[in-house]
Amino acid sequence: MTRAAPQNPIVLIPSRLASTRLPNKPLADIGGSPMIVHVWRRAVAAALGPVVVACGDREILEAVEAAGGQAVMTDPDLPTGSDRIAEAIKRLDPNRAHDAVINVQGDLPLLDPVAVRVAAFGLNDPAIDIATLGAVITDEAALHDTSVNKVVAGFADPGKPARALYFSKAIVPWGDGPHYEHIGLYAYRREALERFVTLPRGVLEQRERLEQLRALENGMTMSVSLIEPERLGVQVDTPADLERARAQVARGR
C-alpha cells in the first residue's frame, strides 16, 4: 500500500538538564530567555503544527510554560531523545491524530525555521521512514574531526533529498567529491518512530556510537536533504558555544 505524505505533523523538542559539558544547558540565559525557549520559538515559526517540549525535568517545563509554550513531562531516566519523544507522543496523542513527529534538538537556539520544514519535506517520499538533514563540509579541519558526523548519500540533484546509505565519524566515502555533515534533526513517520525505539542497539550503532545506524541496520529507509550550514545556527555544547550564541542574539541574529 502506498503511503501518503504526512498530513498532521507535531514538533517535539526533547530536553533535560543533565549535561556533562554545560550543566543546566536548557535553562542557560540567552538574551533574557532560556535557551529552550529560543528553540521552542524557532520551531513554532516553522508553522508545521503544534510544538511541545518533552521535558525530563520540571524546571524546563516551568520555563517553557512561563513563556507561553506547551511542555510535557517524561521519564528523566530515558536514555535518548528518541525515547523521550516516543514517550511524549504517547501521552500527548493517544488517539494517534498526528502521523509524523519532527524531532528538533533542544540546543539549537538560532535554528532557521526553514530547516525544520526541509526535514519534514523528506517524508513526502512514500518510501521513506525517517528524514534528516545534511550540509556540505567546506572546512578541511571539520572533515577530519571525529566529532563531526558524516552522512553518505548520492545526490544526483543536491536540491532534492537522497537516500541516506551510511553514517560515520570517519571520512566517507572515498574518492573525489563532496562530503556531508549529518545534522541531527529528524522527521519520523509515526509508525517508524514507534518501531525505532523498540529495536535493539545495532552492531554498527555501537561501534560508531551513532544511534541513527540502528534504523539502517534494521532495514528502515532514511533520506537526507541538504541545507546551508548557517541555517543550523550555533549548536550549544560548551560554554564557548553559549557565548557565541549570546553574541549572535545580541547582534539581532
Image: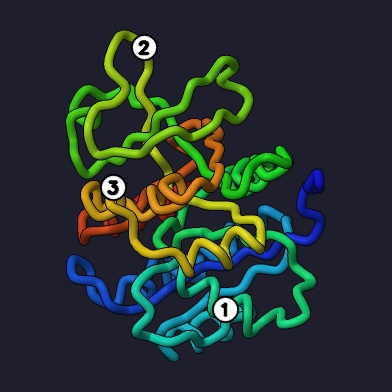
Mark 3: secondary structure = helix
Is 179 displayed left or right of 73 in the figure?
A: left
Q: Is residue 44 visible?
A: no
Expressed as whole percent of the image width and height from the top left, the position of residue 208 reads 24, 47
Mark on residue 177?
2
Residue sitting at x 56%, y 43%: 221
Rendered residue at 68%/65% (across/down): 10
Q: Which mark is residue 88?
A: 1
The disc, 3 or 1, on the residue closer to the chain's N-terminal end is 1
Crowd class of label 2 (few under 14; some 14 to 19; many from 20; radius 10 Å): few
Examine the rendered structure and indicate whether residue 230 appears above or below residue 184. above
Kindly report which numbered mark, 3 or 1, lies closer to the viewer in this rendering.
3
Q: For mark 3, what is the residue? A: 204
Side of 66 relative to 17 (left or right): right
Decide if residue 207 is in sight here: yes
Q: Amino acid at mark 2?
A: Gly
* Local SS, label 2: loop
